[in-house]
């Protein structure tokens, strides 16, 4: 992830986007990204899966990912090609799951205010810098605690545990 | 320190911790279900871990899509079953001996006061009713916990909810928690531990305490806890010695009645007088009316009088929130000898085989069947729109479950209202949302 600049079109949604609309339980008999992605957000925005392109970015309000512990939610989002999620705040299990699987997430309330649906934005997940390319604006996301950085640096929790088991 | 801070300090080998601290902490129990375990098994292998850290500290529970609803669901259970056998996991629960995890584990004596419990299910916070620190995690976290026996935690701020007064008849724990979530909002306790205390909590039975702590997550909380007292210890003593593991492979069976944490802390599992809280919420339940949460958020709770009259197609009494013996007693009491309304499907889902046995002894099963309800095997089923009562387009349900997000319980244009068992029972008879008081 380090050094990689993410660039994409924004899909903007509101507060409390829950895991049931991110990926309904009826599809959670699978945890494979290619099976989940076509149904990502379908109960909220039936057009999402058809419109989203690799690299696109979700921007949302408070409490993104609330509800279930299903890791299928960030897997579906990543599987759909989304490169990053920016929100005012994240529900805690979704936050952990995203860090663990290596989906970049950023907490940046000011950025959410300054970005509209369809805008083109650029994100540096390492530094947390967010730039709006469609209209003026650049913002800084809240930094991750060092312990979380360590997991991010390892590419997710799998890499982190492998390192720990071999040391 | 608060109770939550004390438990995290003990499990991370520190004298004290403060909110915001990041700690690596040893876990006492790791719970997984048919819907979350298979991905963990895959991740566990990717991590290069050979054996789980402790075969007695892992519980694998068939509950979400069981008895298997289709081939894919059957495959999920199969992966979990094979993993349990391969690793020699003591607490694997097979269909017939299994139940909804958050009722099953306490009833099997697998969670005790002062323990640190993680579960790949968001309602793991239920065990806080026993004075444990219990929180939901995802599948990758669970694989990590299986491999290392420890996980990273951010020490949460604690939020105190002081509950005083006496409930009116046919108003209870679910009405309390729906009104608390309404006051806090769906993220009002985000990342925090909610500690429930006060006279009304002291007087509450364990079944009700589980209901209250179960829904802490619906306010965004990391966990909900109640400090252990006589009621808690009475429950723990009654369970002990725990029943032997149901896999009949000659496991060591029960563990000692008191958790090692409780012993090490000298039995002091209460918050210190100078403990710091982010917020203190005071609630008097004396005037609390029966609550109903409107679609599509559990925080949309309002007094039943404001939604009275809404017609419904299906009523579900069950789930990890309200599928316990006291819930069915309360529902049967409200229904009396009256039949289910002709236009309503009433689905009764006891959470565990033990609850079914107790219901048989008290003739509750007989009464529900006579009234025209259907009895489902223990499963999460309709609570997650899985099976055993999924809603069609435009249908309306009244469920005693915990979430009513759009599409959760069936078609995206179906609607679910949430309530306690008393409102659900009265409404099932009347065919529309009804106040159970004086019904």
Image (cartoon, grey):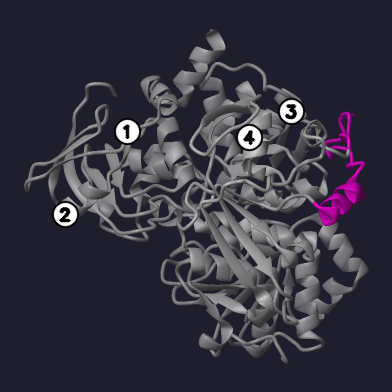
The subunit letter for the residue under badge 3 reads B
Quickly name the residue at label 1: A143
* Frontmost residue, A151 versus A9: A151
Foreground mark, 2 or 3, reads: 2
Q: Could you tell which of marks 3 and 4 lies nearer the N-terminus?
A: 4
Q: Residues within 10 Å of mark 1 (few under 14, many from 20)?
A: some
Residue at position x 71%, y 63% from top? B198
For the residues beneath circles 3 and 4, the answer to whether they share a chain is: yes
x, y percentage for residue A69? 52, 46
Whole-Å distance between the Cαs marked 3 and 4? 32 Å
Quickly name the residue at label 4: B8
Foreground mark, 3 or 4, reads: 4
Whole-Å distance between the Cαs marked 1 and 4? 24 Å
Q: Which mark is residue B50?
A: none
Q: Identify the element where label 3 is drawn.
A: helix
Quickly name the residue at label 3: B85
* Frontmost residue, B342 versus B27: B27
Q: Identify the element where label 1 is drawn.
A: loop
- The part of the chain drawn in magenta is B229-256
Whole-Å distance between the Cαs marked 3 and 1? 43 Å
The subunit letter for the residue under badge 4 reads B
**Looking at the image, residue A46 lies above or below residue B45:** below
């Amino acid at each position: 992830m380090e050094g990689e600049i993410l660039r994409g079109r924004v899909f903007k949604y509101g507060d409390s986007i829950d895991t049931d609309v991110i990926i309904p339980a009826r599809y959670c008999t699978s945890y494979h990204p290619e099976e989940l992605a076509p149904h990502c957000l379908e109960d909220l925005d039936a057009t999402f899966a058809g419109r989203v392109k690799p690299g696109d970015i979700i921007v949302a309000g408070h409490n993104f990912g609330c509800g279930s512990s299903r890791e299928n939610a960030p897997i579906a989002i990543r599987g759909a090609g989304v490169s990053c999620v920016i929100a005012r705040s994240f529900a805690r299990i979704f936050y952990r799951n995203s860090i663990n699987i290596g989906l970049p997430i950023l907490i940046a309330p000011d950025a959410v205010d300054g970005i509209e649906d369809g805008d083109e934005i650029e994100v540096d997940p390492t530094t947390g810098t967010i730039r709006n390319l469609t209209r003026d604006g650049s913002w800084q996301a809240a930094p991750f605690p060092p312990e979380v950085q360590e997991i991010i640096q390892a590419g997710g929790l799998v890499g982190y545990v492998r390192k720990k088991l071999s040391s | 320190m608060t109770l939550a801070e004390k438990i995290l300090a003990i499990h991370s080998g520190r004298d004290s911790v403060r909110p915001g601290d990041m700690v690596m902490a040893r876990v006492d129990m790791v719970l997984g279900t048919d819907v979350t375990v298979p991905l963990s098994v895959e991740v566990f292998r990717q991590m290069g871990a050979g054996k789980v850290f402790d075969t007695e500290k892992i519980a694998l529970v068939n509950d979400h899509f069981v008895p298997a609803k289709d081939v894919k669901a059957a495959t999920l259970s199969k992966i979990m079953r094979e993993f349990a056998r391969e690793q020699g996991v003591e607490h694997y629960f097979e269909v017939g001996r299994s139940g909804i995890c958050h009722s099953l584990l306490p009833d099997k004596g697998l969670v005790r006061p002062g323990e640190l419990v993680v579960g790949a299910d968001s309602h793991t916070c239920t065990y806080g009713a026993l004075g444990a620190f219990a929180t939901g995690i995802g599948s990758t976290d669970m694989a990590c916990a299986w491999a290392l026996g420890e996980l990273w935690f951010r020490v949460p701020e604690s939020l105190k909810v002081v509950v005083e007064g006496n409930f009116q008849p046919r108003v209870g724990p679910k009405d309390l928690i729906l009104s608390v979530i309404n006051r806090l909002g769906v993220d009002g306790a985000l990342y925090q531990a909610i500690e429930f205390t006060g006279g009304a909590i002291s007087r509450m039975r364990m079944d009700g305490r589980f209901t209250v702590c179960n829904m802490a997550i619906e306010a965004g909380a990391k966990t909900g806890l109640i400090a252990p007292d006589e009621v808690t210890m009475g429950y723990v003593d009654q369970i002990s010695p725990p029943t032997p593991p149901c896999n009949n492979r000659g496991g060591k069976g029960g563990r000692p009645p008191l958790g090692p944490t409780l012993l090490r802390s000298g039995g002091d599992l209460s918050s210190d007088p100078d403990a710091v809280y982010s917020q203190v919420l005071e609630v008097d339940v004396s005037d609390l009316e029966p609550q109903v949460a409107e679609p599509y958020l559990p925080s949309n709770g309002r007094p039943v009088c404001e939604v009275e009259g809404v017609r419904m197609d299906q009523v579900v009494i069950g789930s990890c929130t309200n599928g316990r013996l006291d819930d069915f007693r309360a529902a049967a009491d409200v229904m009396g000898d009256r039949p289910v309304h002709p236009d309503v499907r009433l689905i009764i889902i006891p959470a565990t085989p033990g609850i079914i046995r107790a219901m048989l002894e008290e003739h509750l099963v007989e009464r529900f069947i006579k009234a025209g309800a259907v009895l489902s095997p223990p499963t999460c089923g309709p609570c997650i729109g899985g099976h055993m009562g999924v809603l069609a387009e435009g249908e309306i349900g009244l469920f005693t479950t915990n979430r009513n997000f759009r599409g959760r319980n069936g078609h995206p244009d179906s609607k679910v209202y949430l309530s306690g068992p008393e409102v659900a029972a009265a409404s099932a008879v009347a065919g529309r949302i009804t106040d159970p008081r004086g019904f």
